[in-house]
Image (cartoon, coloured by chain):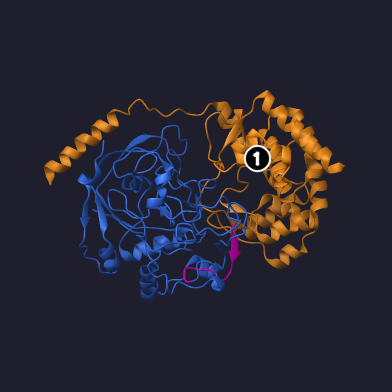
Amino acid sequence: MDLKISFLFTAFVLTASPFSAQVKNGFAFVPGGEYAVGKIGHLLNPYRKVTVDSFFIAKTEVTNRQFEEFVQATGYKTDAERMHNAMIFVPGLKEFEWKQDSSANWKFPNGISRGGIETKMDHPVTTISYTDAVAYCQWAGARLPTLDEWEIACRAGTSTDYFWGDNREQIKKYANIWYGRNHLTADSSDGYMYTSPVGSFDPNPWGLYDVYGNVFELCDGELYGNKKNKSIAHARGGSWWCSKNACNFFNSYDIGRINIHASFSNLGFRIAKNY
Amino acid sequence: MKPLLLFSAVLLSATISAQDDTTWKEPSKESQAYHKFRQHLSYPPYSYDKINEIVRKQVVTDSDDNLVMKDKAYNELFPREKFTYIMIHGETYSQNCDAMPPIQDEQTKIFGHLPDVFNEFNWSERQAKFLADNRDSVMVWIRECVSKNYHIGVNFKLAIQQINATEMIPFIIKTYKMKQKDNDLLTLLMLLMKDNSYPPFLSSASYKKLYGDNSNYQDFILATKANRELIIKRATDFYNGLKN
């Protein structure tokens, strides 16, 4: 049963000025109601029904250009800029290994020696932390989506592992992920080793781009049945680093966890707003 | 737009009703207990109270953050104390994805990979370098610590893999046989065979399932008697081949 776009109303006009770039990219409107989330047998995200209020969610991840507007307006310093402890990736590292680089931050996502974002202003901002994402949201008059809201918008009315069904092979059409067998050698087989410009791949049925791959998207909220742990945040959807062999999280149900100050070059976010 | 919304809501409701029989099954108490058991660390006794105090007061300044021990303080530690520090504290962050989330009937499975040691944290480059630079000592310290309770914590297991301590294979097997409970010791044996490209293992069905082209980090084989015995036999053969 395909509900597709019957739920979807795109809001092209939002009044708050910080949303200038978001207006261009647009938001999807998700009406409040009861939705099914989770996966049968998944211990961290079990299948269940949840009720949410109506909300807007950005169609794209927050870009470097948008984050730069925020920094220029506020003088904000990210966790990585203050603590010089960002984690970066370079080909040659073992699975799940990342390298600390004191020169890396959102302006130089994988360290100064690997270049800045000058030609990547329409890529998602990365090498920021949950704390930084919340600061951006406060400035923008927005918020992070909750774990449930993210999944509802990602699923777009589906109950399968992916918004097109259960066949993982179709991911190529929709997401920037890692196709190499491991991370010892570079993989750009989908056109990108690191991030891709937002919206480079096809959207989901509700018009959201890059819900799988590109960057892990930070969300608010706790795992089902868990108490709030103020030092842990959760992010979803997989990233350019994720492969089918390692961190197979480019799907509608898996939920990761990360320290709220950790800055990785595969970590970003999209924003949401109350209706 | 209202009729369209209403129609959609009805459709969604029907979809949800059709799946109402999918109730969540809580893992058995045995499975939950085994999941916790897999996360247990081994705590080296070398100046443990002193190091733990430093970590508590100087390194982890509040529950929000995870800091690195200052170079001066770190360099003043004796090697055994550094070992203790490294075994109880990861200085850098782990990435977002949870490589080994809990699953049903965990105690009946032998996984291809070890669980995370410090959840959202990991060893830094200087910590990994210390382990590699002091490989022989690390093996001695692990043996000393384990001899007291016959438990090789997940931090020790990862250290053994990191320093590629194939010399410890008989010790790992002996420790496993004491209780025959910790399937992650069998995982460790397989990782050592994999990391050293042991041909009989590379050509096995277990290897294909756990580390082959279509494998995933969360994959496992069942902890049957036959599988357990086969892993031990292969690891023993591998070790004996190294000696010759």
Q: In this orientation, does residue B147 appear?
A: no
Horizontally, is B9 left or right of B175 in the view?
left
Residue A245 higher or lower than A89, as above or below = above
Chief SS of the magenta region: loop
Tint of chain A: blue
User: Magenta residues, as a range?
Assistant: A98-107
Q: Position of residue A103 (x, y in %)?
A: 56, 71
Horizontally, is B148 left or right of B113 in the view?
right
Horizontally, is B197 left or right of A90 in the view?
right
Q: Position of residue B201 (x, y in %)?
A: 70, 38
Quarter residue B107 falls in = top right
Number of numbered discs visible in the structure rendering? 1
Horizontally, is A55 left or right of B84 in the view?
left
* Residue at x-position 38% and y-position 43%: A162
Tint of chain B: orange
Quarter residue A137 falls in = bottom left
Quarter residue B180 falls in = top right
* Residue at x-position 80% and y-position 47%: B139
Q: Amino acid at mark 1?
A: His
Of residue B37 and residue A57, the one placed in the foreground of this image is A57
Residue identified by numbered label 1: B40
Q: Position of residue A99 (x, y in %)?
A: 60, 61
